[in-house]
Image (cartoon, coloured by chain):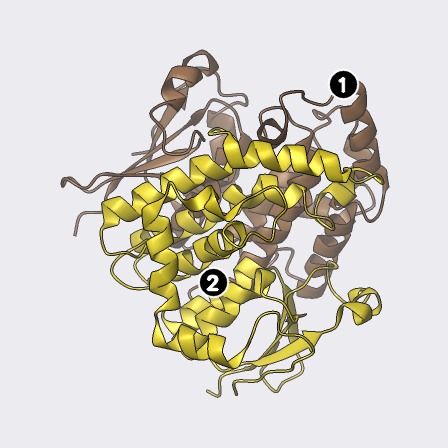
Chain colours: A yellow, B brown
Amino acid sequence: MTPPTLTLTYFGIAGAAEPIRLAAAIGKVPYIHKSLEFKDWPEYKKTTPVGLLPLLEVDNGKDDKQVIPESVAILRYFGKLGGLYPTDPLEALKVDSIVDSSLDSMKAIALTVQGSVTNMISDEPWTKEEVAAIRKRIATTKDAGLLMYMAYLNGVLEKNGSGWFVGDSVTIADLMVLRVTSWVGSGMLDGIPPETLDPFPLIKAHMEKIAALPEVKEFRDKHTTPYGNFKFGMK
Amino acid sequence: MTPPTLTLTYFGIAGAAEPIRLAAAIGKVPYIHKSLEFKDWPEYKKTTPVGLLPLLEVDNGKDDKQVIPESVAILRYFGKLGGLYPTDPLEALKVDSIVDSSLDSMKAIALTVQGSVTNMISDEPWTKEEVAAIRKRIATTKDAGLLMYMAYLNGVLEKNGSGWFVGDSVTIADLMVLRVTSWVGSGMLDGIPPETLDPFPLIKAHMEKIAALPEVKEFRDKHTTPYGNFKFGMK
């Protein structure tokens, strides 16, 4: 059976598609990347299932071409195709649990980012001052989600001992945690200083461990971030 | 190999554990349910990995007993053990995508429920009036998340045609959607009237289809909701 043609559509930024792109790079999963410019988004959005990117088009050459939303679902699919998701149910449970903890750790920050769920609850977004106050709380309060999860994840690394979150090789759990840690550690978020990760040495070592993978190095050399108006294909 | 002993800890309410319990009932997965009283939660919370329930204890009789958080990860595990999660990666992608859309559909409502992420961003929860205004928006505005997702999910059911979300039998995708629809349709949420689901006839038929499964009927006859101080085991 010929594998289907996969087309991933997202903006030319890291964001929610980056774990998928890294999974494809590490797992050698062929796909076409369709890069969308922000100015084209309002029109394009009307054609999407739930108004969200990334989207995956799965084309098996027959009539039932699928267009599937939800970045983590897509990541899990690429993970399975590329061998970054365990076939053993208990090992997969550990991976899924870390993936979901990563998502939970971002919840409070995500609320402070324009275009997120806050749009659903109000026409008036938080002011810059309100966002700064919320972010300060997130970056300094132990029970405010982010720090609690970082401590937990640091502890999971310590217990596992391999430098990876589950087992002794990279899985999609590592890529989801990296999504959070690279965002939090980037200094791009006003109010969240990069030093926020300093109390978690194993998390910082984990970021370096992924960066040192040859496939990730090659991917990053090829695709500078932000990607800009760049269509890249790996097929 | 002897399968591990599974113990699920949660409060005696439906909530986040109900899709897991239903998956176990339908898929005949043996497990022990440890029901926690709300009064015991503050003490118990200190012993949990990230301060959240449900938790799954996986005991294979050896030294490395695992205690794993995150309800959807646990659901996926039970789904695999019970045959409610496809082994084909593309079918699993469809299931995962629906699971994640269900979660997204709840995001805005979840913000209005005490004990959720709002605790992470402020010491002062929204007032009753603010919650009512937000919920009214959620239940009446097309782009406010909930209704957009219900329309999308109704459309997926229409396209699939079997009455189930993926393929022609029940999967964990159905149980996650049910978590949302049974909550939204219950009238328990001030400001979200049960009629909110009326424009989505296939969603309403879907709820009845799950309720009509013999294993679900039997489970619901045995365990009235809320469960109260009831320890139930299916082992």
Pinpoint residue B177: horizontal percent, then vertical percent: 62, 46
Answer with the quarter of the image where residue A205 lies.
bottom left
Q: Residue furthest left?
A: B62
Pinpoint residue A169: horizontal percent, then vertical percent: 28, 64
* Helix, strand or loop under label 2: helix
Residue A157, label in figure: none
Q: Residue at x 45, y 69 (%)?
A: A23
Pinpoint residue A126: horizontal percent, then vertical percent: 76, 37
Query: How far is mark 2 from mark 1, CA to CA?
Result: 39 Å
Q: Is residue B160 visible?
A: yes
Answer with the quarter of the image where residue B75 lies.
top left
Q: Is residue A141 left or right of residue B117?
A: left
Q: Residue at x 14, y 41 (%)?
A: B62
Instruction: Read off the residue under disc 1.
Output: B128
Q: Is residue A204 left or right of residue A67?
A: left
Tally of marks: 2
Q: Is residue A2 left or right of residue B131?
A: left
Check the image and report above or below for A55 versus B230: below
Residue at mark 2: chain: A
Q: Quadrant of the C terminus of chain B?
A: top left
Check the image and report above or below for B8 versus B203: above
Q: Residue at x 30, y 57 (%)?
A: A164
Taking depth in this image into account, of A28 and A132 the one nearest to the observer is A132
* Helix, strand or loop under label 1: helix
Q: Identity of the amino acid at label 1?
A: Lys
Q: Is residue B75 visible?
A: no
Q: Identity of the amino acid at label 2?
A: Arg
Instruction: Read off the residue under disc 2.
Output: A76
Taking depth in this image into account, of B53 and A228 the one nearest to the observer is A228
Residue at mark 1: chain: B
Q: Residue at x 76, y 18 (%)?
A: B128
Check the image and report above or below for A196 versus A142: below
